[in-house]
Amino acid sequence: IGCNHKGELDIAKELLTLCKEAGATVGKFQKRTPKELLTPEQYNAPHPNPENSYGSTYGEHREFLELSVEDHKVLQDHCKSIGLEYSCSVWDTTSAKEIVSLNPTLIKVGSPSNQHWELQKVLRDEYTGEVHISTGMTTKEEIEKIVQFWEQGKGDAKNRVVLYNCTSGYPVPFEDVCLLDIRLLQQKYAHRVKAIGFSGHHLGIAIDVAAYALGAEWLERHFTKDRTWKGTDHAASLEPAGLSKLMRDLEATHTALTYKAEDILDLEKAQRAKLKWGQYNKDILDKAKK
């Protein structure tokens, strides 16, 4: 969901209900402290896409979209009431501490923040849940630094990490999704972190099914009620109907990803007797051999 709630708590709650109805298992938001995160120049600069701005500067825009930690507690309680897991991406140290105070099952570190070590130290040392980390706009050397940082944590820290393949763009054209990087993460890190996931900013739902078939254990998509709403993330988001179809297709793929229990399945036996050469005409062939 991110900030697709437009800064309104009621819309945020509605989006949680809609994604639960569509079949999602986790509803995730974002938390920032704009004056901590941004330089003064960034804060006071105009939004790069003024038509999508909720303030006269980029900083004011970000402040407008922020929900308080008390609001996030309301959202967490709403998730519990509808049987959905609450989560949040944190962008700075203050936000990390605030969301840690809610003790959700998992917290996300987005691609922009995956080299923010003070933030990750809070999640590593002051929190015991899963930490999901995206690797968009990140070099292979930087990914290695992330994993090493968590390996240096006390106890089982590294086994709380889920690494996500990701390309940072809104939306991402298919040729830049680079799904096979999932295999690279699996080869290098499957034994060093808890799991490998995929965070998609592409259009449609076919890519997610392919990511799942390649072994991604977690799938993340942006979600909105209306892709025409004001804001930069809506265009790369799924609406309720799209998310429902994605969940349907993932369930079907999950069911299909099995091995045959026996060479000839029960549903094949009648077809084998009727259609397979050497079966329906076995008697004739046997006589011809004599």
Image (spheres, helix red, strand yellow):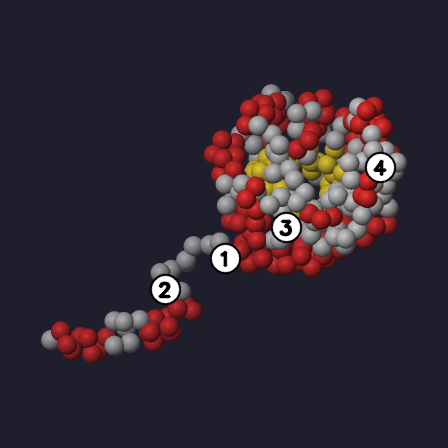
Real-space Cα distance between discs 4 and 1?
Answer: 45 Å
Q: Which mark is residue 256?
A: 1
Of mark 3 and mark 2, the one earlier in the sequence is 3
Residue ID at (86%, 50%): 10
The reply to whether discs 3 and 2 touch (Cβ–Cβ < 8 Å) is no
Of mark 4 and mark 3, the one earlier in the sequence is 4
Residue ID at (67%, 57%): 242
Q: Is residue 273 left or right of residue 40?
A: left
- Judging from the image, what secondary structure is the residue with disc 2 in? loop
Q: Which residue is mark 3?
A: 203
Q: Which tag is nearer the camera, tag 1 or tag 2?
A: 1
Real-space Cα distance between discs 3 and 2?
Answer: 39 Å
Disc 4 marks which amino acid? His
Of 278 and 1, nearer the camera is 1
- Judging from the image, what secondary structure is the residue with disc 4 in? helix
State the image coordinates of residue 211 (x, y, percent, origin top left). 54, 46
State the image coordinates of residue 37 (x, y, percent, origin top left). 78, 27
Q: Which residue is mark 2?
A: 264
Q: Is residue 187 left or right of residue 121?
A: left
